[in-house]
Image (spheres, rainbow, N blue to C red):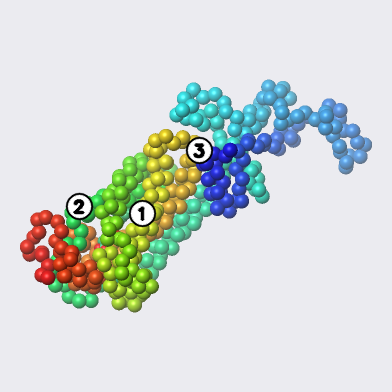
């Protein structure tokens, strides 16, 4: 039976354009062209008088594919193609590493696989091609498109400013705990995003400027930072999820908000509760759905999932899943970071100080503001409450 990971590999490779069947059985490689060219003439010589219809005596043909290394060495000293054929077909050799820790240590490379319509190839090479021909160019293009679209929007529409004057009366939007969780997560995310981008795309834009040595050290450093920031991101993401899940549940007005695009183009903000439908989409799509996939695949790549057998195809699948999910996540959070910084007046202050002006609350989250004014939600949730900052209901 196929291993689940091998089955998944089949699906993934198929999704990326190969209608694939990953062979569970090793497939014999053809004799190398060099071996075929250099093969000695058959013992019986050419049988036909017509040189255009050469029919060599098959029985006299040495069976290259069945030769041992020793037999091959006799006819072609130095040619160890039989050994490499065995290596390619997945024959396990000897390794002093314990099998429990390194189950594939006796296999120099992965077995060859045959995709219909494509040449016989090594599974590692197939993964490399998916990475270099699909994930890197399309992932990079998506990120550039998102950055470009946001830049165009900013140049065309500018920052979303407050329409009314600030009152000076503040409402507590985020408690110190919420802000700590958010910033721990955001810092880890930035480390992961920057190091991930340099590891994936750095050779195109940094290597030519920095040179091999410096780029090598930089990626080495960033790779280690990535590995350590990952678990911090995972833990803070879980905290973020439980901290904000309640106010991200669907509520009245979400659909209308989405249908009107939040009033982003019309400039007339659509009322919402504490978080609007756009934020809820980022929460459920980015924090929850992509978060689970990114963290799970990242923990596999960090070898932190107990009981899992870490073989090459497992790591390749984890890598491909991780790459797709992280690019989508970055694309989502580039938008979040834009709105949370230069895109909207007053939003960053809310996450920095914990407080927003009443005018900001009314203009951007009207239902939430109404609930605060009606006393349904306390204007000050954390202790101690600075009297000057309490909202006048
Ligand atoms: C430098 C990076 C980031 C900046 C500048 C930033 C900024 C902000 C700001 C200003 C808010 C308040 C929005 C409001 O008042 O409605 C916010 C809320 C939030 N942020 Fe971030 N953020 C960053 C990264 C992240 C990351 C990486 C995540 C999660 C993976 C995240 C998850 C959230 C969540 C869950 C909220 C609460 C609102 C909601 O549920 O949508 N943020 N952020």
Local secondary structure at mark 1:
helix
Left or right of 245 in this view: 81: right
Provide the residue designation for mark 2.
177
- Residue visible at 15% across and 64% down? 379
Residue 312, numbered circle: 3
- Of badges 1 and 3, the one in the foreground is 1
Q: Looking at this view, is 201 or 249 the one in front? A: 249
Q: What is the x, y in percent for residue 380?
A: 14, 61
- Residue visible at 35% across and 60% down? 282
Q: Which image quarter is the N terminus in?
A: top right
Local secondary structure at mark 2:
helix
Regarding residue 282, the answer to whether it shows in the image is yes
Give the class, few, some or many, for how many residues have Cα within 10 Å of label 3's Cα (few <14, many ≥20).
some
Q: Label 3, label 2: how many angstroms apart (C-alpha)?
A: 41 Å
Q: Earlier in the sequence, mark 1 or mark 3?
A: 1
Residue 288, numbered circle: 1
Q: Is mark 2 within 8 Å of ligand 1?
A: no
Q: Earlier in the sequence, mark 1 or mark 2?
A: 2
Q: Label 1, label 2: how many angstroms apart (C-alpha)?
A: 20 Å
Tell me the quadrant of ligand 1. bottom left
Q: Looking at this view, is 352 or 53 the one in front? A: 352
Given contact means CB atoms under 8 Å apart, are the residues at marks 1 and 2 in contact? Answer: no
Q: Earlier in the sequence, mark 3 or mark 2?
A: 2
Q: Is residue 364 above or below residue 96?
A: below
Q: Is residue 95 above or below residue 123?
A: above
Q: Quadrant of residue 162?
A: bottom left
Left or right of 73 in this view: 190: left
Q: Looking at this view, is 89 or 366 the one in front? A: 366
Q: Looking at this view, is 143 or 267 the one in front? A: 267
Regarding residue 355, the answer to whether it shows in the image is no
């Amino acid at each position: 039976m196929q291993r689940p990971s091998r089955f998944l590999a089949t699906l993934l490779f198929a999704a990326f354009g190969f209608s694939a069947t990953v062979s569970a059985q090793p497939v014999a490689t053809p004799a190398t062209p060099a071996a075929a060219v250099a093969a000695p003439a058959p013992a019986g010589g050419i049988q036909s008088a017509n040189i255009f219809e050469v029919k060599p005596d098959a029985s006299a043909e040495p069976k290259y594919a069945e030769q041992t290394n020793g037999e091959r060495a006799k006819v072609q000293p130095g040619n160890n193609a039989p050994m490499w054929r065995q290596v390619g077909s997945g024959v396990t050799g000897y390794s002093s590493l314990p099998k429990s820790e390194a189950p594939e240590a006796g296999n120099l490379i992965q077995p060859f696989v045959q995709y219909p319509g494509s040449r016989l190839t090594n599974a590692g090479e197939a993964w490399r091609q998916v990475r270099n021909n699909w994930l890197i160019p399309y992932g990079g293009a998506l990120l550039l498109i998102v950055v470009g679209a946001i830049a165009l929007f900013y140049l065309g529409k500018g920052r979303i400013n407050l329409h009314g004057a600030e009152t000076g009366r503040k409402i507590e939007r985020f408690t110190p705990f919420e802000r700590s969780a958010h910033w721990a997560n955001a810092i880890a995310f930035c480390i992961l995003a920057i190091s991930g981008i340099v590891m994936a795309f750095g050779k195109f834009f940094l290597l030519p400027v920095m040179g091999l040595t410096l780029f090598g050290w930089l990626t080495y450093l960033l790779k280690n930072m990535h590995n350590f920031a990952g678990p911090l991101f995972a833990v803070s993401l879980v905290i973020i999820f439980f901290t904000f899940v309640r106010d991200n549940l669907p509520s009245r007005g979400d659909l209308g908000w989405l249908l009107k695009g939040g009033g982003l183009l019309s400039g007339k903000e659509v009322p919402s509760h504490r978080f609007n439908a756009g934020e809820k989409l980022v929460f459920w799509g980015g924090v929850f759905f992509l978060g689970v996939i990114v963290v799970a695949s990242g923990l596999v790549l960090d070898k932190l999932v107990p009981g899992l057998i870490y073989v090459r195809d497992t790591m390749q699948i984890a890598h491909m899943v991780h790459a797709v999910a992280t690019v989508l996540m970055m694309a989502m959070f580039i938008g979040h970071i834009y709105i949370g910084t230069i895109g909207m007046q007053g939003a960053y202050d809310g996450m920095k100080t914990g407080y927003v002006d009443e005018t900001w609350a009314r203009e951007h989250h009207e239902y939430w503001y109404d609930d605060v004014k009606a006393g349904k939600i306390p204007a000050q949730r954390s202790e101690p409450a600075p009297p000057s900052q309490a909202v006048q209901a």
